[in-house]
Image (tube, rainbow, N blue to C red):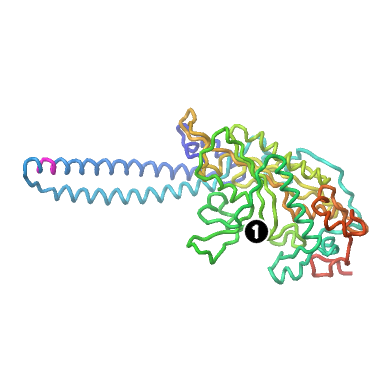
Amino acid sequence: MDIALFREKGGNPDLIRESQRRRGAPVESVDKVIELDDKWRKLRFESDQANTRLKALNLEIGKIKQADKANKTTTDVSELSAKVAEEKKIAAEIEKAQEAVLNERDDMIFSIGNLVHQSVPVSNDEANNEVVRVWGTNREQTADLKHHHELLYMIGGYEPEVGAKVAGHRGYYLTGWGALLNQALVQYGTRFLHKQGYTPVQTPYFMKQSTMKKVAALAEFDEALYKVTGNEEDEACYLIATSEQPICALNMNKTLVDKELPIKYAGISTCFRKEAGSHGRDAWGIFRVHQFEKIEQFILCNPDKSWDIQEEMIKVSEEFYQSLNLSYHVVNIVSGELNNAAAKKYDLEAWFPTLACYRELVSCSNCTDYQSRKLDIKFGTAKTAEGHTRYVHMLNSTLCATERALCCILENYQCEKGIRVPEALKPYLQFALDDLEDPNVIPFVRGPPPVGKGAKGQVKK
């Protein structure tokens, strides 16, 4: 956030304190930033004073030497030179202290969440998420319905046991129809966004630590990000948890003008997450895994238009799931569940009939200028009336985390003989569907997984 907002003169620290209260986050962090900023400004003043004295001493020595040259004399300036050396030492010590305080201040600022939008429900309990819209007719929960991991195994699309042996906990192979359906979602999602005017971007799968620190919260380094070793450069790298991270950095250190905006990207990537904070949750199947594919919406825009654009982005995601005929609701996430970058977040949660509940498939966040400040992506060259630099607003939204979407499709499209094929995916599967006895249904080729396969497997009798 802008340091000017923390200052009493011209700023509004109470606004930040109130936002922290809404998040259930420590208000004391705001006061710590103010304390460090005051200390930094005092050190900057001392540094300016030391440099002024140093400049005066050098000027005095210069005048003496100039006079000596004109008069062909020699004046002892050793005392003045000693003072110059002393002032240089003082200036260097102040500069070092100033830099340390500045880094501590800026790290503390980055630990404080974005300003929560007024429309966000204030609560620390996600049970209080506000339902904004509901679409579709939910399939009824019946005793004969099977869970996604069972269905995926039964169509020969999933090998969890050997996946765990090869890759560890939550490891898996998608095979046959599992791989084909997953790739169909990747292709369909990419085409869907391309038709909406998004530019496809296949991102790097890992990022330098120095760049990742500008786009990922500090907690993510422990809970989500895998560190990459053995790279040629000295700097550590991290695998991406979402294509949002490298796309954030695509325009860093640039100034974008209004006529260039909005810039709309369709991120295409495999994503990697440790899921350290999710131990024991969704331990079976492919709903929550360490490696998955995702098609992501990402937009840079005029800061005056970001709230309208967030509404457009969630509607694009809704249209995608409507085209797959998956019922869902959209919720406005409570303040205490927002990540630091998000000022407001919508989740689209789709219906899973086997559990008779809605589960998250999409997160759509307006991060305003929280990330663009760190990445130095400016909006135009004109400053505000208060003399402040403006930065573009950055928004991100899942279109399709394909493994999760596949879970939902399997559960909702299951029938007695197999999995009915969604109409929207048929063009991407037709070459394989033509080989089936019924080209509308992917058949079961084996029974449910034995106990121990897919973790949950069948219930022991």
Q: Which residue of the protein is positioned furthest toward the top in this rendering?
A: 385
Q: Label 1, on which residue?
A: 272
Residue 65 is one of the magenta-drawn residues: yes
Question: Where is residue 270 shown, x and y percent of the image?
Answer: 67, 56
Question: Where is residue 263 shown, x and y percent of the image?
Answer: 61, 39
Residue 356 is one of the magenta-drawn residues: no
Q: Total label count? A: 1
On screen, residue 118 above or below 336: above
Q: Residues within 10 Å of mark 1 (few under 14, many from 20)?
A: many
On screen, residue 131 above or below 206: above
Q: Residue at x 69, y 50 (%)?
A: 295
Front-lying residue, 192 or 16: 192
> Could you tell me what secondary structure mostly forms the magenta stretch?
helix
Magenta extent: 64-68
Q: Is residue 275 left or right of residue 50?
A: right
Question: Where is residue 253 shown, x and y percent of the image?
Answer: 50, 44
Residue 220 falls in image quadrant: bottom right
Secondary structure type for disc 1: strand
Residue 443 falls in image quadrant: bottom right
Front-lying residue, 437 or 111: 437
Question: Where is residue 388 shown, x and y percent of the image?
Answer: 47, 33
Q: Amino acid at mark 1?
A: Phe
Q: Is residue 433 left or right of residue 274?
A: right
Q: Is residue 32 visible?
A: yes
Q: Residue at x 10, y 48 (%)?
A: 76
Q: Is residue 125 visible?
A: no
Q: Which residue of the protein is positioned furthest toward the left in this rendering?
A: 72
Q: Residue at x 50, y 54 (%)?
A: 210
Q: Residue at x 89, y 62 (%)?
A: 444
Quadrant for the C terminus in the image: bottom right
